[in-house]
Image (tube, rainbow, N blue to C red):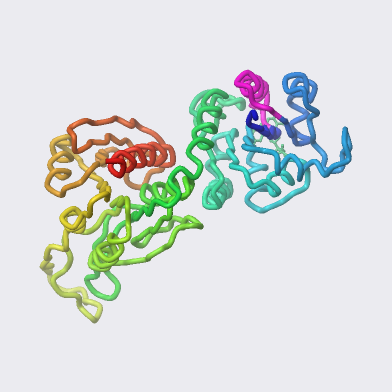
Amino acid sequence: MPLTVIVGVSGGIAAYKSAYLVSALKKKGYEVHVLMTQNALKFVGAVTFETLTGNAVLTDTFERKEEYDVKHVSLAKKADMLIIAPATADILAKAAAGIADDMLTTTLLATSCPVVFAPAMNEAMFADSATQHNVSLLKKRGYYVMDTGQGLLACGDVGSGRMKEPDEIIDFAMHVFKSLHDMAGIRVLVSAGPTREMIDPVRFLSNRSTGKMGYAIAQAAINRGADVTLVSGPVAVEAPLKAKMMHVVSAAEMASQMLRLCKHADIIVMAAAVADYTPETVSSLKIKKGADMTLNLVRTKDILSELGASKKDNQLLMGFAAETHDFEANAKTKMNKKNLDVIALNDVSRSDEGFESDRNNIILYYKDGTSQNLGSESKTILSQHIMDVLKKQYQKMTAR
Ligand SMILES: Cc1cc2nc3c(=O)[nH]c(=O)nc-3n(C[C@H](O)[C@H](O)[C@H](O)COP(=O)(O)O)c2cc1C
C-alpha cells in the first residue's frame, strides 16, 4: 500500500513551490491529496494540483465534489502524513487555537497522523511573539514545525522566513515518518536549564542556559515514542506535554533527582548547565549593602562523574561540553574522565549560537575515538540528529 500524504496549501506566495512538492511526492509513489485554503486559491489554481495528483482539491468543508462521505474525516483517517506547505502565520495561529473553519483546518483537527508545518512568511511576521508562541505551542503538542530558510523574501526583504525547499520538506517529513515510535519502551532521562545557587533570599548565582537544548532533546525523544523524564532548572520554556517533569532549583536538588532517577533510565542526557560552585553559607536575611564583601564558594557535586561512575550495563550516558577554547581536547578529556559514551561539544563563545539562542553548533565525540560534526542548526533539528545517534548506539549496545 502506498503511503497517503495530504498536502495542505495555505495562502502565501510560496504556494507555487507546493506544486513541485506535490509532484515530487507523486514521483516517489505516494498517494497525494491536496487541501487548499480559499486564500491559497488566489495564488495557485486548484487545477494544477488536481492534474498532478489525479484527485479533487478540497477547500470548503461543505463542498460535495464526489461521494457523500464526510471527507475531512475519511481523509483524516486515511492519511499517513499531513504536510502543510506553505504554512502561513494565519494557519499556524488557527492550528494553535484549534479553529476548524475550512477543509484544511478541520482535517488537521480530525487527523491523528504526524503533521509537518513548513512556515513561510515575512521575517517580522515569523519573529512576532504571537507567531513564535503559536509555533512553540504546536511543537509542544507534538506537531513538527520546520525552521524557515534564509534568503530573499517575496516582500523584497532579505532574511529568514522563506519556506524550506520542497526536497528538504520531503526529507524532513520522511525522517519523521520513519522514526515514529522507534524508541517506544526506551526510558530517557534528560536534564536541562541552569541551576540557581542562593546567596540570600533575593540573590543567586546562575548562568546563561535557557534550557532550550535539553527541552528540544526531550521533545525529540517523545516524538519517537520514548518514555521521557525531564529534570529542569528554572527556565521560561514550555514543558513538552508528554514529559514527566521534575522541577529543581539548585545544583544539590538537580544532583539528588538525577542520581535517584538514573537507576530507571536506559539513556541519560545531561544537558543542564549545573553550577560548579555554590555559596558556602546562605544568609537567611537579605544582605544589606555596605563595605566590599567576599563570597566563599564551595564545590557542588559533579553529577556527570557520579552518573558515569554508577553507570549500569546497557545504559548510555551523554554529556555536554560547553567550551570557549581548546574545544576538542577539553571535550575528549571530559568524556573519558567521566565515563561518558558520547559528548556533545558546543562553542559557547559565539553570540549567535549556543546559550540564549535557538541554534547551536555541535560536534559529537564517541568513546571509540570517532566523531561526527552535526554542524550549525536549530536546536530542534540537532536534537533529532542526536536522537538518531543515541537510538543507534543504544540498539548496538543492547544487541551485544
Ligand atoms: C501577495 C501576498 C503574499 C502573501 N504572502 C504571505 C506569506 O508568505 N506568508 C503569510 O503568512 N501570509 C502571506 N500573505 C497574507 C495571507 O495571504 C493572509 O494572512 C491570509 O489571510 C492567509 O490565509 P490562509 O492562511 O487561510 O491561507 C500574503 C498576502 C498577499 C496578498
Tell me what residue is drawn at x 63 percent, y 41 percent.
Answer: 89
Which of the two residues, 398 or 295, is positioned nearer the viewer here?
A: 398
Tell me what residue is drawn at x 23 percent, y 36 percent.
Answer: 365
In the rendered view of the protein, which quadrant contains the N terminus?
top right
Above or below residue 237? Residue 77 is above
Q: Report if residue 26 lies within the magenta region.
A: yes
Q: Where does the image place residue 72, in percent across and percent down from the top left?
A: 77, 43
Which of the two residues, 271 or 123, is positioned nearer the viewer here?
A: 271
Q: Where does the image place residue 28, in percent across and percent down from the top left?
A: 60, 21
Secondary structure, magenta segment, majority class: helix
Above or below residue 229? Residue 26 is above
- Whether residue 192 is visible: no
Q: Report if residue 36 lies within the magenta region.
A: no
Tell me what residue is drawn at x 66 percent, y 24 percent.
Answer: 22
Tell me what residue is drawn at x 15 percent, y 39 percent.
Answer: 332
- Whether residue 265 is visible: yes
Q: Where does the image place residue 306, in percent across and percent down from the top left?
A: 17, 58
Q: Where does the image place residue 32, in percent across and percent down from the top left?
A: 69, 28
246 horizontally vs 80: left or right: left
Which of the two residues, 131 or 294, is positioned nearer the viewer here?
A: 131
What range is drawn magenta here? 12-32
Rendering quadrant holding ligand 1: top right
